[in-house]
Image (cartoon, grey):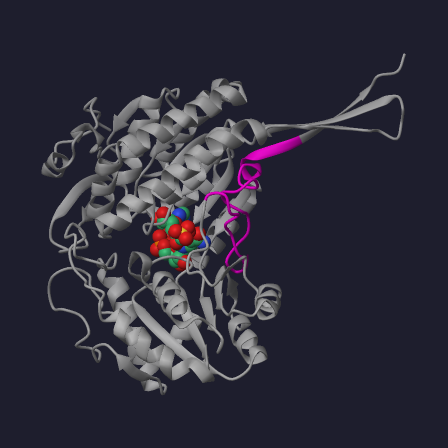
Amino acid sequence: MSSNGTNGNTSSEASRLKDPSLFSTKIVIGSQRLDSHSGKTFDVVYPGDRKVIVATIPECNTQDVNDAVSSCLSTFKEFSQTTARQRSDLLRKLNDLTLANIDDLATLIVRENGKTRAEAEAEVKYAASFLSWFANMAEVGCQGETIAAANPSMRIQTIRQPIGVVACLLPWNLPLAMATRKIGPALAAGCTCIVKPAGETPLSTLAFAELVKRAGYPDGCVNVVTTLDNVAEVGKAICEHKHVRKVSLTGSTRVGKLIAQQSASTLKKLSMELGGNSPVIVMNDATIDKAITGVLLAKLRTSGQTCVAANRILVQSGIHDKFLEALKEKIKTYKQGDGEDSSTMLGPLITDRAVEKCRAHVADALEKGAELYYGPQPPSSFPDEGGFFYPPTILTGLSDDMQIATEETFGPVAAIRKFETEEEALEIANNSDVGLGAYVYTNDLRVAARMSAGIETGMIGINTGMLSACEAPFGGVKESGYGKEGSIHGMAEYQIMKSITTDVSG
Ligand SMILES: NC(=O)C1=CN([C@@H]2O[C@H](COP(=O)(O)OP(=O)(O)OC[C@H]3O[C@@H](n4cnc5c(N)ncnc54)[C@H](O)[C@@H]3O)[C@@H](O)[C@H]2O)C=CC1
Ligand SMILES: O=C(O)[C@H](O)CS(=O)(=O)O
């Protein structure tokens, strides 16, 4: 294991930054920036042209995980004793530093994820919102209770305490926002963190760890381990480590089930923000322009790579044809290309596997009776070279037997299905093992109320395609997982509540 003492910003990529010292390619263990014990590395590829190796990053193993947890544990003894006020002040400094470095953080997100700069800057602001939110929550969320005991001799109180060492497992689609959505409440509660970003997108998390240090946090509050190909070993080491008391995962349901199994031996507290299959229901009385805008936002944000992406678009028969025509006219205007090009509206997907998944979903749907309403016919649907692009596509005639109806496409493919009645739409929408987000377009409050009650998801947007905000509880039901992130509920995920009964008689 070597340490060059700096953050390894030897890459030409660092020259893209105003502050090249934010280009960090070493893992973070306490005060040290290190290579992995194995000395092995992996490359981060720019999805916009799949050629440039953006950075070479340590491929961690069990020893690295153990070092990171040891760092968390030793710092926890000190950090857990800070006051809520102190932790609130630190989060405000971290929020301010994050926003002050928005240009560089956005550059790193564009380079590692491929999304447009506009989306990357929006993500940095979204990420910072969790820091400012939990700066406010730090003092509120740490309050306990005094309970009137039935026994006059007794005084019953509760206090909230940090749960301990927290593991944060992050997805690649919003690498920074998903980091702060976990690290923010964990630090607010007084926990210390071992953070594992997705192998595809480690750079914004490593830069954020630099800002944590600059904000004045004790070394060891936020430790970062990285892996791409050794994730099974690293994940197992995290899940089975007895000093890791909490795991917060944002990722697929497949990985969520694995984490739950592996964490069972030490009975860790878990927050599971997993996969979705979001239905959109457009009723005949919907305002069509609003519906088109919202559906395309829910479908195409981050090129369709969000867990709350519109995956099944159900349109009532009376508005179906008009809606389709308007959707096609609008989707045509979405220009794909390099994220740094200001005219680009859709960046590439994260890998060629993601492109292949879109192609396979379209091909499968067409074989099972769907029609290609807009977009290229597979397999000519994606370029032979260049970035990981899949062209925006509209399919009609969606049916439950198609892969695109039961799996997240995670790409710019809009699958439309006509329905007749409200009851039919609700039945189709709920025919899924997962339940994260859903969207309903109607001007009838009674329909909105019935749909809000009847749809089996954790979150619903009514006449909007955006249901995420730091103040709103984010999380799903069924196999989309459990736990809430953000909101007044998000901090309790990182705390224990202790009840204290005192005999005050005599
Ligand atoms: N509910 C939510 O808030 C969100 C859910 N997602 C879901 O995540 C998926 C796409 O994101 P991905 O990063 O591809 O998900 P993924 O499940 O493949 O990976 C998520 C994280 O888990 C890690 N991981 C993978 N195997 C692991 C193992 N054996 N042990 C420990 N960690 C492991 C990955 O390295 C990554 O850091 C989609 O299903 C999407 O719906 C994505 C973003 C938000
Ligand atoms: O990672 C994701 O997909 C996010 O949870 C979706 S959102 O918070 O940006 O809506």
Q: Nearer the viewer, residue 122 or 503?
A: 122
**Majority secondary structure in the magenta region:** loop
> Which quarter of the picture shows residue 367?
bottom left
Q: Position of residue 459 (x, y in %)?
A: 52, 57
Q: Quick one: 49 or 345, which is closer to the camera?
A: 345
- In the rendered image of this protein, does residue 75 appear above or below residue 194? above
Residue 429 percent across, percent down from the top left: 51, 72
In the displayed structure, does residue 498 sit left or right of residue 226? right
Where does residue 112 sit, x and y in percent of width and height? 22, 47
Residue lying farthest to the bottom in this orientation: 369
**Is 190 displayed left or right of 307 in the figure?**
right
Q: Position of residue 506 (x, y in %)?
A: 90, 12
Quadrant the N terminus occupies? top left
Visible residue check, residue 359: no
Number of marks present in the image shown? 0
In this rendering, the answer to whether 74 lies above or below 347 is: above
Residue 270 in view of the camera: yes
* Residue shown at 41% from the left, 68% from the top: 291
User: Does the magenta-highlighted stretch encompass residue 74?
Assistant: no
In the image, which residues are magenta? 470-497
Q: Quadrant of residue 167?
A: top left
Q: Residue furthest top?
A: 506
- Left or right of 424? Residue 497 is right
Residue at 51% over, 38% down: 246
The residue that appears at 21% across and 21% down in the rendered structure is 5
Determine whether 312 is above or below 123 in the image.
below
